[in-house]
Image (cartoon, rainbow, N blue to C red):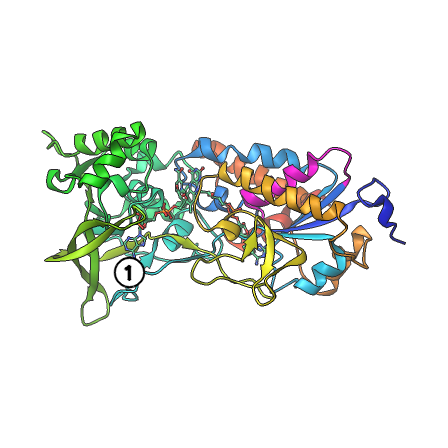
Amino acid sequence: MSNTRLLGSSEHPLRVAVIGSGPAGFYVVQQLFDTPDLTVKCDVFERLPTPFGLVRLGVAPDHQKTKSVVKVYHKLATNPDFRFFGGVEYGKDVFLADLQAHYHCIVFTTGAQTDRRMNIPGEDLIGSYAATEFVAWYNGHPDYCDRQFDLTHPVAVIVGVGNVSIDVARILASTTEELQTTDIPDYALRALKNSGIREIYILGRRGPVQAAFTNPEIRELGRMADADVRTFEHELVIDASSQKAADSDAMLQRKLEILQDYATPVKVPKPRRVTLRFLTSPLEIIGDQKGNVRGVRTVRNKLSCDKEGRTHSTQTEQSELIETGLILRSVGYKGKPLPGLPFLDDRGIVPNDQGRVIDPSIDNTIRGIYVSGWIKRGASGVIGTNKSDAKETVANLLADFRQKTILSPQNLDSEDIENLLRNREIRYVSYGEWQKIDRLETEMGVSNHQPRVKITSREEIFKALDSIASAKD
Ligand SMILES: Cc1cc2nc3c(=O)[nH]c(=O)nc-3n(C[C@H](O)[C@H](O)[C@H](O)COP(=O)(O)OP(=O)(O)OC[C@H]3O[C@@H](n4cnc5c(N)ncnc54)[C@H](O)[C@@H]3O)c2cc1C
Ligand SMILES: NC(=O)c1ccc[n+]([C@@H]2O[C@H](COP(=O)([O-])OP(=O)(O)OC[C@H]3O[C@@H](n4cnc5c(N)ncnc54)[C@H](OP(=O)(O)O)[C@@H]3O)[C@@H](O)[C@H]2O)c1
């Protein structure tokens, strides 16, 4: 029944499966829909019942303006050539052979689903966690909404100086008033309201010039109602090569000025404080007899520069102990291997050549299989970075389509994949059903002056859909 000559026409549309519904997934769909003279049907498979990846479940609840990017994704999702299969996990519910039998091209946009480790003693003590878990908890991620974090100790330590560290520190140091008009789940708001944390240390292993956080985020930290930000003058002294880098970079100079301002002691201290430390690495997490975190031993570093001009930290003999009950390592997210695909474990990515997946054992690309977003390039870059990334992947996908080097699926009826899911008794959430959840969450938020009240567990989402359906009967 297939007619290769007309592939991409309205009679014989190109069928593309996208795995993952974060920014990368939606920008891939956008690039495909924007291609002139091409009829393309996009089916997006998402392991969670809700769409939008880290925009819903990573971007901080007090950054609602950033979350409004979903309006763009919503527009794409209401195109008749788009279908959403929420709650369908690649590698558990559907497999590579299923997709190869139904689609001409498969694009994996599964992001970075796990965390990097510090590889120091004591990392698994009770009270030492990945920031990925804490972020997912305060954002109402279905896999983390039942987690509990002990916030009773007056001191918390965050390792790493990226934007995620800044988000986590801001959430820990916010007042209830600052958070209650966001979409933070009620359980997290209650836990943070009762938090005993008064001092938050953020540890950067290198100097201020090498800090990964960006200026708006570090500036925003200094505008909290109940928390001061502090730096130490002696940790802001920079070496010659860092100075050279700063001299030619106006944004870096601005960052240093902001950090310098924080070194001025405040006259009237606020009840909480965030202290940014530089040239400080954790050496060992120390526990008590019950296996709870009691403190972290740190070491002071000095900087050195290699031949390529990259600045490294080396440990000195100077160490100190910070007493704490909570350590959050925020040293980066990491991709997870996908069944049936090659994987580069050290980088946490699927090996690829500008989006075309490569099989390293034959040093060649795998027909019809692509990646985009964090699973393609690693866990870095803001939402918009995924747009240019998707452009590159889709350009290569379309080049392969024109060269006829894509897949030749047997099952081209749009109902085939629905039948497959039904036969496997997989209940999935369509985009129409997500819109009902979205409406319900938004309505529930109105009386609380919140943008929405998130429904956080899978069971609650399906229960809500069932009651909406039975109310209509
Ligand atoms: C805590 C945090 C805060 C951030 N805040 C900002 C910000 O304020 N502004 C900004 O511009 N950028 C921010 N970013 C960066 C931004 O979120 C990322 O650039 C972007 O989300 C990466 O997009 P992605 O689609 O590759 O991954 P993701 O957004 O993670 O999407 C991947 C999707 O794939 C799904 N998936 C994974 N495995 C499977 C599977 N096996 N089967 C089916 N589906 C699967 C996941 O559930 C997820 O929905 C933040 C990042 C983090 C971690
Ligand atoms: N508001 C926003 O726009 C926003 C918010 C959150 C996230 N994001 C984006 O999302 C991406 C991921 O952010 P991220 O904060 O997870 O990662 P990141 O920007 O890569 O920062 C990771 C931090 O961890 C440090 N680190 C790594 N390994 C370490 C170790 N073993 N010991 C001590 N420190 C270590 C790094 O230091 P070194 O530099 O020394 O390696 C760096 O300071 C970034 O692109 C970020 O900008 C954006």
- The C terminus appears in which quarter of the rendering? top right
Viewer-nearest residue: 299 or 150: 299
In the rendered image, residue 446, in percent from the top left (x then y), is placed at 49, 32
- Who's the residue at 74% across and 56% down the image? 407
Instruction: Name the element at disc 1.
Output: strand
- The N terminus appears in which quarter of the rendering? bottom right
Let me know if residue 35 is in the magenta part. yes
Left or right position of 94 against 101: left
In the rendered image, residue 159, in percent from the top left (x then y), is placed at 27, 52
Disc 1 crowd, CA 10 A, few/some/many (<14, 14-19, 20+):
many
In the displayed structure, 66 sits above or below 347; it is: above
Let me know if residue 66 is in the magenta part. no
Q: Residue furthest bottom?
A: 289
Q: Which residue matches tag 1?
A: 128
Viewer-nearest residue: 370 or 146: 370
Q: Residue furthest right?
A: 1
Question: Is residue 422 at all visible to an observer of this figure?
Answer: yes
Identify the amino acid type marked 1.
Answer: Ser
In the rendered image, residue 294, in percent from the top left (x then y), is placed at 18, 62
Where are the magenta residues, as a range?
20-39
Viewer-nearest residue: 274 or 288: 274
- Who's the residue at 45% across and 30% down the image? 65
Q: State the image quarter where residue 287 is shown.
A: bottom left
Left or right position of 306 against 56: left
Left or right position of 328 against 359: left
In the rendered image, residue 195, in percent from the top left (x then y), is placed at 25, 48
Question: Is residue 323 at all visible to an observer of this figure?
Answer: no
